[in-house]
Amino acid sequence: MTAWDAIVIGAGPAGVGGASLLAENGARVLLVDEAPGPGGQIWRGIETIPESRSRILGPDYLMGKAEAARLRASPAHLAFETQAWRVEADGTVWLKDKTGIRQERAHHLLIATGAMERPVPVPGWTLPGVTTIGGLQILLKRDGLLPDGALVLIGTGPLFYLYAAQCLAAGKRDLTLIDTGDTGALFRALPHLPRALSGRGPSYLMKGLKLLWTLRRAGIKFHERPQDLRIESAGEALEVRFQSRGASHCLPAGHVGLHEGVIPESHMTRSLGCQMRWSEVGAAFHPLRDVHMQSSMNGVYVAGDAGGIGGATVALLEGRLAAMSILEKLGRPVDEHLRNITHRERRAHLAPRPLLDRLYRPRAALFSPPDEVIACRCEEVTCGEIRRAIDTGSAGPNQVKAFLRSGMGPCQGRICGMTLTSLTAATSGLAMDEAGYLTIRPPLRPVSLGEIADLIRP
Ligand SMILES: Cc1cc2nc3c(=O)[nH]c(=O)nc-3n(C[C@H](O)[C@H](O)[C@H](O)COP(=O)(O)OP(=O)(O)OC[C@H]3O[C@@H](n4cnc5c(N)ncnc54)[C@H](O)[C@@H]3O)c2cc1C
């Protein structure tokens, strides 16, 4: 098998930015993504979306058109509808597409697998009709679909307001927002305002203010700081119950969308053995990286939201910075002026991050849900069962997994991993870093034994 100079996993802004630059400068690059085309989360379906729908999604969405075109014009090899389900430190990547399983190898890996939504384990989150806002947004971007009937959105963070505004632009009026942002957030965020007003910060703040203004002006019903929030089924429909400003509320809903921010998708970097760190401000684990976007492992680069949440432009710039480093290692010339500008731009786009992270930090209750709430959706394990397993001597998330099967289902702990760590930390009085995390092993995506057997069948 001839080794590629680089395999890039993920064709969002980070992967597209990295793969285009590598290929344009003569590197042999393979870019893989499980989606049918480039774009990632923000620019999903950018090459095929009808114009009427792309206008609803806004200018940040449209920015993806030029980047996707640049990628297509480059000599990068593109493999869409292809999942990377096992990645090894020597640069071997195991792929799965509709023809089966195969291995590729590269001298350098660029992991650009993006973010996932933070799981929101609140009472009723597993009921039919309750989904994440990211999931609802995928239906809008990919298929132009909006939920029928009354839609209640619960949560906080930029994507929460963005999706609400996109619903409005698409003509949805039967919409109520329950903003879970806590009272102290503004005070914790304020000291970071001066930095947020530097660099490219003002344009992000203006975008946020415009979204809020659009929602308020449209007369969307808002509730703030809900207490004792629970979602219950009511026949075919749902009810959202909570206390706010001393009053009890019960909102009927056809669908409920939940969102409490995004966190780096860490299973691939963890499976490789990259060193991870808990960020108290971002309330998430992320891989350690140097200024060149290289992880703690030589030759393994991590760009974009997979390395730490920074948004689409930061992801694109980080993809390019990682590509420049790989080019340098390949002995190809690198434009130092361009590299300095890219670093400077990245810093300028990160200026509002400390403010945004504090403003939208999820409330403490999310890290310690009530006993009856299901933590592991695949194996239906409740928080109470996990607490009891820790109380009776489980040494951490991996032993809880062995006792209760939490984290052993098809998602391999993507959904319950954080809850297992936070319950271990809270119950044992440990810091999140000390509580540890599930040991992540391949397959990172479901693969059947038959597919593996096909590899050795003569
Ligand atoms: C659900 C969701 C919706 C979002 N919507 C918006 C939005 O509308 N506007 C906005 O500004 N920001 C949005 N964000 C934030 C957004 O993720 C970033 O700003 C930006 O897209 C990050 O770019 P990235 O390249 O790091 O990752 P992404 O854009 O997330 O791209 C990662 C890519 O990796 C692929 N991938 C992951 N794992 C594998 C694997 N094992 N095998 C093959 N391919 C793989 C995915 O299919 C994806 O295409 C959203 C985030 C999420 C989680």
Image: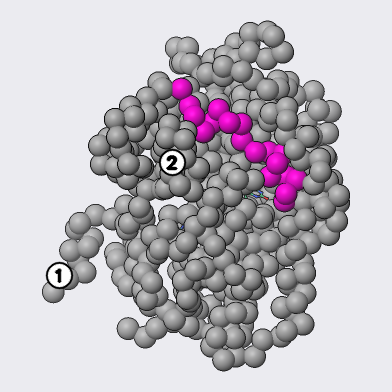
* Amino acid beneath label 2: Thr
Name the residue at 28% across, 55% down: 447
Q: Secondary structure at mark 2?
A: helix
| Ligand 1 occupies quarter | bottom right
Q: Is mark 1 within 8 Å of ligand 1?
A: no
Residue 26's place in the image compared with 144, above or below, is below
Question: Residue 310 at what x, y percent from top left?
Answer: 66, 55
> Magenta segment: does it hold 366?
yes
Tell me which segment is drawn in magenta.
Answer: 353-370
* Amino acid beneath label 1: Arg
Question: Residue 154 at what x, y percent from top left?
Answer: 61, 28
Question: Residue 236 at what x, y percent from top left?
Answer: 46, 16
What scheme was used to colour the molecule?
one colour
Query: What is the number of the mark on residue 388?
Result: none
Report which residue position mark 2 lands on: 421
Whether residue 446 appears in this view of the structure is yes
Name the quadrant containing residue 320.
bottom right
> Magenta segment: does it hold 203?
no
Report which residue position mark 1 lands on: 457
Q: Nearer the viewer, mark 2 or mark 1?
A: 2
Name the residue at 20% across, 56% down: 449
- Mark 2 or mark 1: name the one nearer the start of the chain: 2
Residue 58's place in the image compared with 242, above or below, is below
* Callouts 2 and 1 close, C-beta under 8 Å: no
* Pointer 2 local density, CA inside 10 Å: few below 14, some 14–19, many at least 20: many
